[in-house]
Each structure stands twice: as C-alpha cells, then as structure tokens.
Amino acid sequence: MYKIDFNNFFSYSFSIDCVIFGFKDGQVNVLMIKRSMKPYLNHWAIPGDLVYPDEDLQVAATRILTELTNLSNLDLHQAQTFGDPNRHPQGRVITTAYFALIRIADFEIEASSFAEEVKWVPIHEVPDLAFDHNLILNSTYELLKKKLSYEPICFDLLPEKFTLNQMQQLFEYVNEAEMDKANFRKKIRPIPLIALGEKQQNVKHRPAKLFSFDSEKYSEIAEEDGYRFKI
Amino acid sequence: MYKIDFNNFFSYSFSIDCVIFGFKDGQVNVLMIKRSMKPYLNHWAIPGDLVYPDEDLQVAATRILTELTNLSNLDLHQAQTFGDPNRHPQGRVITTAYFALIRIADFEIEASSFAEEVKWVPIHEVPDLAFDHNLILNSTYELLKKKLSYEPICFDLLPEKFTLNQMQQLFEYVNEAEMDKANFRKKIRPIPLIALGEKQQNVKHRPAKLFSFDSEKYSEIAEEDGYRFKI
DNA sequence: GCAAAAGTGTTTGGATTACACCCATGC
DNA sequence: GCATGGGTGTAATCCAAACACTTTTGC
C-alpha cells in the first residue's frame, strides 16, 4: 500500500519549543536561552528539546522547560506545529510550540543543561534566532494577542497584585493603541476583581489601589451567567 | 548530553489527519472514510496518513486528502497536534490535524487507496472512530466554531449563491441558539455581499434573494478601514 | 384566501466614546 | 503650590434586542 515500507517511516524526530511570555517595564518579554551545543552553538533560541520516545507532549514540554531554565509548574498551552523538512540541519525534526505566561518577578530563572545563559528579551527586540525560532515566536505572539482579548489570561502576566493602570498598559502594548482611562475602567467592570485595600508604594504621585483577579468568582459567573471575558 | 543518543531519537512517525467540514440540510457534516487496512480495519476514521520523510506538512495534507477522497485544491488550515504515546497501536505516531471547509455540492468525493468507502456524517451523529479520531474531531470542531465567528469562512461552507436565511441557519446551528431574523440582517450589514438579482427556485413560499460573498471588497475594507468580521 | 417564509421598520435600553473635572501624594 | 498620575461623572452616540408589521410566492 505504501511506496515506502511502513517501518521505514519511523525515522523522524520530534521536539517541543517553549515560548514563555512575561510582562516587564510595560513591555511583553520572552524568555531566551543561549545554546552551548551544536547545531547553532552560541546562538540565541527559545528553550526547546527532543521529546522522549514514550513521553507525552505536555509532559515533555514541562520537563524540557525545567531542564533548561529551572521553571516549573507552568501552565503550558499548545500552539502551532512546524514541520518544514529543512528546518533542522541534522534531520527531519518536527516541532510543536507550547507557550506559557508568567509573572516575571515571581520566578527565578537559571540556565542549565545546554542553556549557557537565560534572559528576558522584549518581544520587539528579539535578535536572529536559531532554527526557525523567529517564525515560531512571531506566530505564537500572534496567538497570544488573540487569546488575551477573549480569555482572562492577562492576569497570568500581571503581578498577583496589580493596578488598573498596569492592566491597561498591557492591553495598550499588545494592541498598539492608546485607550481612555475612564472608558477602560468601565469596560472591565464586569470582570470580577478583588479590591485589596492596599496601595502602591514608593511612587511620587497619588498611589494607585491594588487589585487581584477573582478567578473563583470568574468561573462561577462564566458557568452560571455564560459571561465571556472580552476586551 | 542526552541520556539517549541523538540518533536514536529518529524513531518516530508522523501523520496528518484531515477534518473536512461541509454544511448540508441545515447541519454541519464531516467527511469520514472506512478503513480497508489494519490497524482498525473496517473502522470509520477521518482521512489521514503518514507524512513522507522529506515532505512539507501542508503538502502532505493535500496529498493525503486527494489520495483517500479525490478532493483537491482545498485550503487546509492547521489545527491541533496529538501526541499521546499510546494513540497508535503500532508505534509512536504523532499526528497533526488539518481542517478544510467545502461546499458539499461542488465536489465529487470518491474512495480510493485504503479508504473503502467515503461519506458525509452530521457532526452530531459521528460513531466511534479509529485511533483518537473522536478526540481530534471534537477539538477541531471547537476550533471551527470559534473561527466562524471572527473570520469570514462561513462562505466556504455555504453554496456559492446562498440566501441570508441559509447563512443565519449555519450560525444558529453552530452556536446552538436561535437568532432574530431582522437583527441578524442588521448585524451582517457591514459584510460585503453581492446581491445577485436571482431568486430561490422551487420553493412553495416567497423565494429568497440569492447573495454571494464579495471577497475582494472584503480584503479592501479589511485593509483600509481595519474592518474585522464579527458575528 | 391562506399558509409559509421573505423582508423591513420602530422602539427601547444598554454599551461605547469623548471629554471634563476632582483627588491624593511627593517634593 | 505644583507636577504627576489616580480616579470618576456626564452627555452624545452607537448598537443590539424585542417585536410588529408588510410582501411575495404556491396551492
């Protein structure tokens, strides 16, 4: 039936690449590693590696990220799969991108395995990367932008306690458009936030109130009232 | 560096599964094949097969679909990738789902290769399928539902010449909710449609006007005015 | 004429926009 | 007091939902 014998098809390799987004200094940042291994020795790349033969993809994504950056317990979501026959110089390696959102300040990143260095880079300042990683990164950032507007995932990027202005800045950044402060606040009124009663510290103007996302209440109203997040 | 030698990682196989959606008798239908080959001999499945070692994924998807169903020139879009280590009984086969939308009446489907039979099945009447194809189908249908509401792809499912009521029925079907006729028509007013001046035939009530989608004008206003399709 | 579906207009209330204004803090 | 951003109210406008009504066809 096949022109090639079935068993000869078991000649591919499969990898996962992890795009980790954070929000820092008013900019979306992405986590990069410097490779201490061929191919693309000394090139910057997004963290990624081969999947073990009997390993589930989601499990592999988590393991690979931990091995290279020391990050764990992240909620990794599948993005696109890239399979250009020439994307890897050493053979046919198909890769699936996963992405996660993190609160940069809450985690210690640490280079290990073949990652010689790890750092955060603003999404608009990413250099030329190994393999087709620029392509992977761009397409995953497009996906992030879409998801941000109809799923309550901005709170995974913002600090646990955030000001409404920080939240607004995140949306202004990804949509590349300024918004009216009063109108933004009216728009997010249906989103359940907890007013913490605390205030910003060490600012040289009136300190803003701090909020956190009420995810329990969100699930409640999403189920009962069919409320859908929308910005 | 690896616990397993790099070359031993080249032991996977990779496949594509194609979810083809159509709209018939007021229902979304999906194209199924009956397998005349092991594994899952005589089981129903969605059309899919292994990718050749040097073949691009998009190219493979097109080839596989043509081989099994005689469909060609479809616009296949990538959906999710499925990689459970036990999803294929004969080894580690990772698969990527692709989907396409077609106007059922415009195509002749024809079983060939290891497809013994091909048929359209309403999405809500799909039987137990081979492999994890029920999972693949369901998750791809969820994706379709999302895309239908913010991309002008409903017109790939509707006949070239359609009535506004057919269009409304498609959205009512996927959203599982009835809509007000007058309000639906107001909602789609910004979408550029060509009034053909023709009418429905052989109906025992007032015949509806026929329309077609003006994709050129759509691209124009999408670029110039930043118009985004939304239903 | 009647049934059935096509096709349109009106009213109402809620959201979105633009814009103006006041408030709290550091220096 | 003044600079800086925090925080809120109002009026005009647009949009969506609910509903009623007229039109055109087959029988």
Image (cartoon, coloured by chain):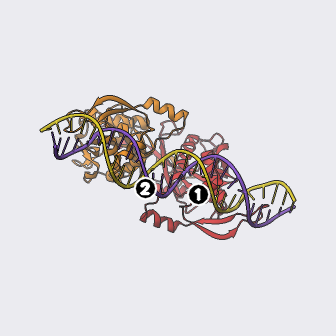
Chain colours: A red, B orange, C purple, D yellow
State which quarter of the image contains the N terminus of chain A: top left
Q: Element under label 1?
A: helix
Q: Is residue B194 above or below residue A64?
A: above
Nearest the viewer among B183 and A84 is B183
Q: Residues within 10 Å of mark 1 (few under 14, many from 20)?
A: few
Question: What amino acid is found at the position of numbered circle 1 in the picture?
Answer: Lys
Q: Element under label 2?
A: loop
How far is the residue under mark 2 from the one under mark 1? 50 Å
Are both tags, 2 and 1, on one chain?
A: yes
Rendered location of residue B216, percent (x, y) = 45, 29
Labels 2 and 1 touching (C-beta < 8 A): no
Q: Residues within 10 Å of mark 2 (few under 14, many from 20)?
A: some
Report in which chain the residue with disc 2 lies.
A
Rendered location of residue B166, percent (x, y) = 31, 41
Residue at image location 25% in from the left, 40% down from the top: B114
The residue under label 2 is A54
Q: Is residue A194 above or below residue B114?
A: below
Q: Residue furthest bottom?
A: A197
The residue under label 1 is A186
Residue at image location 38% in from the left, 39% down from the top: B51
Residue at image location 49% in from the left, 49% down from the top: A79
Question: What amino acid is found at the position of numbered circle 2 in the picture?
Answer: Asp
Residue A182 visible in the shown view: yes
